Amino acid sequence: GQQVMQIPQYQHVQEGEDFTTYCNSSTTLSNIQWYKQRPGGHPVFLIQLVKSGEVKKQKRLTFQFGEAKKNSSLHITATQTTDVGTYFCAGRGGRRALTFGSGTRLQVQP
Amino acid sequence: NAGVTQTPKFQVLKTGQSMTLQCAQDMNHEYMSWYRQDPGMGLRLIHYSVGAGITDQGEVPNGYNVSRSTTEDFPLRLLSAAPSQTSVYFCASSPPGGFEQYFGPGTRLTVT
């Protein structure tokens, strides 16, 4: 079955440093989504990427979808304490169901 | 709109007991799904539904049943609880023609 791997599992940064999490799928994806989950909360949708090589930005967050549509990344520039949480990628193959990665937990030290 | 609601928020069961986790949404979403979240394992899909009367299995369906008699409700039934089912359970829904999933607040289940 489809597998989605995410690295690193955990990242601890100083406030102001950059952060990147990577997502890799065992199969080609039709699209990929990113979610953020604050500690004790539920996942919240951030964005969806559909096209090969697509790059989207949301303020300090930059999302990329690989040319082969098998990998993706989320980059946060100049982290803030409000960025703390776990970031999940979720890939969709041929079915409607999503396969989630295991997530990257981000800790930001003020 | 209340969005996606889940009850209860917390539950403790003994091995062998059965129970139903409730999920409801008031956004007229066709697609609804159940996930379990365990430390270090992300979210794993249990069951999903693309509309009333239609359900399908996800990645980890064993030990769970679902039904979808209305658009609004998608209950998850644990038939005979086991300690391996200790987890946080999230229900989610997606709008018609949409793609983003809206998650409920979750139910934290402990099976002793």
Image (cartoon, coloured by chain):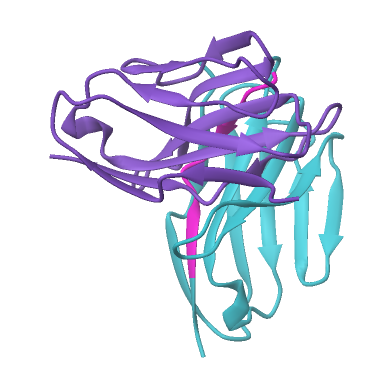
Vertical relation: B56 (above or below) B5: above
Q: Residue at x 26, y 24 (%)?
A: B18
Vertical relation: A86 (above or below) B73: below
Letter of the chain shown cyan in the rendering: A
Return the x and y of residue B103 as percentages of the image width and height.
61, 45
Quarter of the figure with residue B13: top left
- In this orientation, which residue lies closer to the viewer: A100 or A15? A100
Return the x and y of residue B16 as percentages of the image width and height.
15, 23
Toward the bottom, the furthest residue is: A110
Return the x and y of residue A81 as percentages of the image width and height.
57, 82
Q: Residue at x 46, y 20 (%)?
A: B59
Q: On the picture, is B35 further left or further right than B16?
A: right
Q: On the picture, is B24 further left or further right than B83?
A: right
Q: Is residue B34 visible?
A: yes
- In this orientation, which residue lies closer to the viewer: A35 or A55? A35
Vertical relation: B46 (above or below) A61: above
Q: Is residue A100 visible?
A: no
- In this orientation, which residue lies closer to the viewer: B45 or A79? B45
Q: Does the magenta-highlighted stretch encompass residue B4?
A: no
Q: On the picture, is B28 further left or further right than A104?
A: right
- Chain B image colour: purple
Q: Residue at x 77, y 72 (%)?
A: A60
Vertical relation: A36 (above or below) B62: below
Quarter of the figure with residue B28: top right
Picture mark count: 0
Return the x and y of residue B24 as percentages of the image width and height.
60, 36
> What are the residue bounds of the magenta stretch?
A96-106
Q: On the picture, is A95 further left or further right than A48?
A: left
